[in-house]
Amino acid sequence: MKEKPVIAVVGVGAVGSLIAASLNEASIVPYLVFKRPEDVVEVKNVGINIYVKDSPHPVKGIISTYEDLRDSSLDIAIVCTKAYDAPAALYKIRRKMKEGSLAIMCQNGLGSLEAAKRILLRSKAIPLIVNCGVRAEGERTYRLVGCSRSFIPYVQMSYYDDLLRGLNILSPVKIREDEVEPYRWLKLAVNAAINPITAINMISNSEVVEDPYLRILAFDAVKEVEKVAEAYGIRLPINPVEEMVRVAKSTGKNISSMLQDLLNGRRTEIDFINGVIVARGLLKGVDVSVNKALWLMVKHLDQSVLRYA
């Protein structure tokens, strides 16, 4: 009988809950890893639920802190923390990983995958490019409001197919045998428009493309990302403006993760989305003035929210 892999979902918020529920549907019960002992107590008391088409999916897992995990015990860690929390999580998890284990990074923007490759020297790190809208609806309760195909590279591991079978159940995942980096930049282009514009104006996703003035702003932000990608030798797999419009409409009633962060008094991931575009664009001499303006405006909101939270 084939031994089951030991899998942990690190950071069980909106995306982490979706992934854990998907694994549950494939009879995989992962460790659910939280940073604080008080989070463990809360989850044990109230549980975690994610709604898919009005059907509740209670999330099942072994609720843990980092300290509860044995050293060298994990075959796979699916890291779903916020981008700015990822390095600290990686340092905490690295002793728990087996030699030759796999870290799957699910963050928005650029930077987290690169951090994993620096920190987890005994493990292979790959991205899972999640293209889903998940909304928080109360205490440890989430709703899947829209999903398109997500992307992940193929890895030669004995239990990788079991993992992919689980991930595919609630959110379709496309395995790419070739390079996935263009898809990471494609998602970055979409996020660079929808996230800051919805956060600044406190609107839903669809309003970004329904309002004629915001639509122009969004198009310009996306086109800048495409130019920065090209400067680094990356050709986006499909038209990023058309993809941004499609995502905004398909997740129309959703509010972006960046707006959710502001409304809940949390720091946003703006530095890993528009901020990284600005930094990389300036290094290559690309005009990134639209992304710079969006980055600065959200940085102001970040400061204001954290000051009064």
Image (cartoon, grey):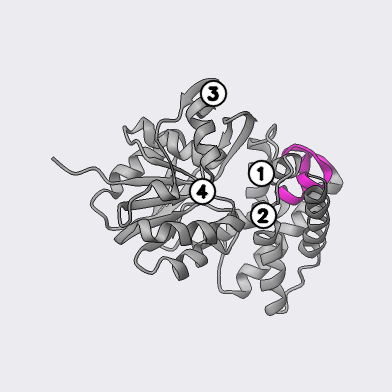
Q: Residue at x 83, y 44 (%)?
A: 201
Q: Are marks 2 and 3 in contact (CB under 8 Å)?
A: no
Q: Residue 257: which numbered mark, if any? A: 1
Q: Which residue is mark 4?
A: 80
N-terminal of the two: label 1 or label 4? 4
Image-quadrant location for residue 104: bottom left
Quadrant holding the N terminus? top left
For residue 269, side relative to residue 19 (left or right): right
Residue drawn at (34%, 57%), measured in percent from left and top? 97
- Which quarter of the rendered picture does the C terminus lie within? top right
Q: Which mark is residue 53?
A: 3
Residue 273 on the magenta span = no
Left or right placement of residue 181 versus residue 277 in this view: left
Mark 1 or mark 2: name the one nearer the start of the chain: 1
Q: CA distance from mark 1 to mark 2?
A: 9 Å
Boundaries of the magenta span: 195-211
Q: Position of residue 36 (x, y in %)?
A: 54, 45
**2 or 4: tag closer to the N-terminus:** 4
Amino acid type at mark 1? Ser
Q: CA distance from mark 2 to mark 3?
A: 28 Å
**Mark whose residue sits in front, 3 or 4:** 4
**Residue nearest the viewer, comparing 80 with 154:** 80
